[in-house]
Image (spheres, rainbow, N blue to C red):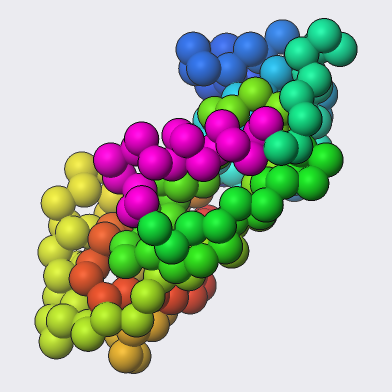
Amino acid sequence: MTKSDSQLQRDVTDELAWDPSVDHADIGVAVADGVVTLSGCVKSYAEKMAAEKAARRVAGVRAIAEEICVHFASDRKTGDAEIAKRIADILSWDALVPDEGIMVKVEHGLVTLTGSVEWHYQREAARKAASKISGVTGIVNLLTVRQRPVADDVRQRILDAFERQANLDAGGITVVAEGSKVMLGGRVKACYERGIAERAAWAAPGVSEIEDNIIVF
């Protein structure tokens, strides 16, 4: 059953309130034709991303327009040089992120990550680590996944991963592998199912690019 915009608004608001990593009091939620617009200000970039993920978990959400800003108290402003050093330090300490191959640039609080890593999860781990630093207002993640031989059975590995997911109806998803690129198609019932499919595909060895054509209905 298709949800009305007012029901979606209530569901997204409830999900934000339920998530302990989000201070929902300063986040506004508007819905039009299944498209959710988040507005307001939060205290960190990590909280901004957590709010977006919470909204994506709600069944019936077709798309998200994210207009949340990151606002820091005036007495806690941090210079770009200090932000860059803190990010470099936290990347060197993070066991999920390789010690070499990542360059960090900070300009007016906006962080740009460049270089290459072996796995997609390392790319995401670097972004998450950088988002924890106070003073970061946004992240441009230009890290690339290095080319490596793709397993012959990559399509079957992805389909098997889909089948293991309790919250994913794998029957409606198609997978086509061409070299290191994987194309996903088909239909799912919610944005979070589409996210599960993407994560499962990224976990396959040798995948460096994903074209996600899955439709949420």
Is residue 101 something one can see in this rendering? yes
Image quadrant assignment for residue 81: top right
The part of the chain drawn in magenta is 82-99
Q: Is residue 161 left or right of residue 86?
A: left
Q: Is residue 72 left or right of residue 90?
A: right
Q: Is residue 94 magenta?
A: yes
Q: Is residue 11 magenta?
A: no
Q: Is residue 20 left or right of residue 158?
A: right
Q: Mostly what secondary structure, the magenta segment?
A: helix
Residue reaching furthest to the right: 74
Q: Name the residue rendered at 26%, 61% in the picture.
A: 203
Image quadrant assignment for residue 71: top right
Indicate the position of residue 21 as horizontal and vertical percent values. 51, 17
Indicate the position of residue 97 as horizontal and vertical percent values. 35, 48
Image quadrant assignment for residue 23: top right
Of residues 173 and 110, the one nearer the viewer is: 110
Indicate the position of residue 65 as horizontal and vertical percent values. 75, 45
Of residues 199 and 57, the one nearer the viewer is: 199
Q: Name the residue rendered at 34%, 53% in the picture.
A: 98
Is residue 28 something one can see in this rendering? no
Indicate the position of residue 12 as horizontal and vertical percent values. 61, 26
Of residues 188 and 149, the one nearer the viewer is: 149
Q: How many marks?
A: 0
| Above or below, 9 relative to 162 | above
| Above or below, 43 relative to 186 | above
Q: Is residue 174 left or right of residue 6?
A: left
| Above or below, 191 relative to 151 | above
